[in-house]
Image: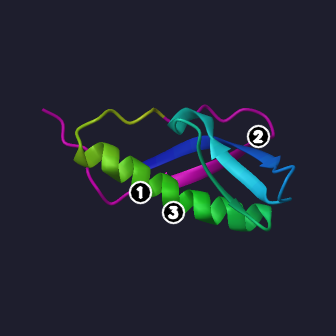
């Protein structure tokens, strides 16, 4: 299954690191020295978060609607959501 979420990018004022977060996934966030690194780390973290939700039978937030020039992250999980 593929999920697409809007990414927010900020710069940490204390460290200078780039922070990437996904508001729709409880503001799951990670950081890096560059936007690319922060997003790659966020991808790994968020995919694990979604897979944990699936394992625990929790609902997965629906994908964000693609609007304008916002930045979006596509997450693919191998785990399948079982429907009763």
46 up-or-down from 38: above or below: above
Residue ID for mark 1? 48
Which residue in the protein does label 2 denote? 70
Q: Which mark is residue 44?
A: 3
Secondary structure mostly seen in the magenta stretch: loop
Q: Label 1 vs label 3: CA separation?
A: 6 Å
Measured as percent of width and height from the top left, residue 10 is found at 80, 46
Front position in the image: 2 or 23: 23
Q: Residue at x 29, y 35 (%)?
A: 58
- Please, is residue 64 above or below residue 43 in the view? above
Stretch of the chain drawn in magenta: 63-84
In three-dimensional space, the C-alpha distance between marks 1 and 2, rounded to whole angstroms, equals 23 Å
Q: Between 65 and 30, which is closer to the camera in this rendering?
A: 30
**CA separation in Å, label 2 and label 3:** 20 Å
Q: Earlier in the sequence, mark 2 or mark 3?
A: 3
Question: Where does the image place residue 32, in percent across and percent down from the top left?
Answer: 72, 65
Look at 40% across and 48% down and name the residue there: 50
Asked if residue 4 lies in the magenta stretch, the reply is no
């Amino acid at each position: 299954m593929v999920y697409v979420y809007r990414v927010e990018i900020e710069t940490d004022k204390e460290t200078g690191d780039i922070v990437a977060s996904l508001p729709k996934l409880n503001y799951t966030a990670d950081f890096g020295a560059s936007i690319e690194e922060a997003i790659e780390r966020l991808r790994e973290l968020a995919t694990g978060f979604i897979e944990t939700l699936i394992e625990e039978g929790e609902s997965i937030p629906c994908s964000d609607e693609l609007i304008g020039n916002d930045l979006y992250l596509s997450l693919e999980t191998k785990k399948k959501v079982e429907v009763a």
